Amino acid sequence: MIPLSWYLLLAAALFAVGLFGVLARKNAIAILMGVELMLNAVNINLVAFWRYLDVQAIAGHAFAVMVFAVAAAEVAVGLALVISLYRRRQTVAADQIDLLKW
Amino acid sequence: MTPMQVIFIITAVATVLAAIMVVSRRNLVHAALFLVITLFGVAVNFILLDAPFLAVVQVLVYIGAIAILMIFAVMLTRNIQEDGAGEAFNKNVGMAGLVSFLVLSLLVVTLGGWSEFRALPPVANTSGAVEALGLALASADGYVLAFEVASMLLLGALVGAIFVAWPRKNENE
């Protein structure tokens, strides 16, 4: 049987890789991909703790479903923003998007 | 080593390697395809955790909708001057690698200090989980409020995405 620690280590690695993508990538769409990786790491943790602690308490499943819904909403709005931005400024590089910079 | 452990190790290595490719490829179409591999790896993990419903939802929502939407956005925002010549990373790449490595170390050290980390056995019987999830999402004692809020969030995201991405008439010069 697979120990719980393996799942948690996999989720930690996936979260760290996603965090690196969010912090280091230049393209705004690539930043959104990093966010997706982090959300998936969280989902693995939620389901793993559901499986190993209390199967009757369905909170792990319910929160994972909520994460799916929020991820879908986030990526729809985020990509709409990216497309709108590309139409106005002809770039999706995050370091050139500085309209709000003080 | 049981067969399940072998499957887990193969899947985990493939998932993490594909994730590293997602954050390091310069060509974003390739990054999106590696993202699909990563999401499939997570779906396999859901199967191994006896959550087949979530695995199906993962394939439907993440791979079928989100990854395809990403690929469409990549194709719609191709910048001709920067294509191929643009760098994958911004100038903070060293600091970003340091921060994510520190987060990974912190997580591993914290998890390693937890006494039940290695010894916790899985719960034996997982039957009826999908039925319990459906009841919990529709009962007032469970998550019906979160369910309704999520549906409102999706509606708001739908309207907002259409509004934001719609071309303005007076800016089409």
Image (tube, helix red, strand yellow):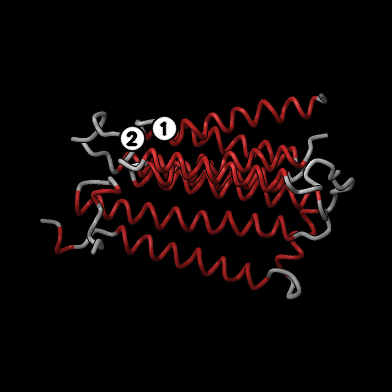
The picture places residue A58, in percent across and down from the top left corner, at: 76, 59
Q: Would you identify the image quadrant in which residue B167 lies?
A: bottom left
The picture places residue B53, in percent across and down from the top left corner, at: 71, 47
Badge 1 marks a residue whose secondary structure is: helix
- Identify the residue at horizontal 71%, vertical 55% (top origin): A61
Q: Is residue B39 above or below residue A60?
A: above
Which corner quadrant holds the N terminus of chain A?
top right
Furthest-bottom residue in this view? B140
- Identify the residue at horizontal 57%, vertical 70% (top origin): B149
Badge 2 marks a residue whose secondary structure is: loop
Give residue B114's mark. Answer: none
**A100 or A71, nearer to the observer:** A100
Q: Is residue A8 left or right of residue B61?
A: right
Furthest-right residue in this view? B124
The residue where tag 2 is placed is: B88
The picture places residue B164, in percent across and down from the top left corner, at: 32, 61
Q: Is residue B50 left or right of residue A84?
A: right
Q: How far apart are the two marked residues, 1 and 2, measured between alpha carbons?
A: 7 Å
First in sequence: mark 1 vs mark 2:
1
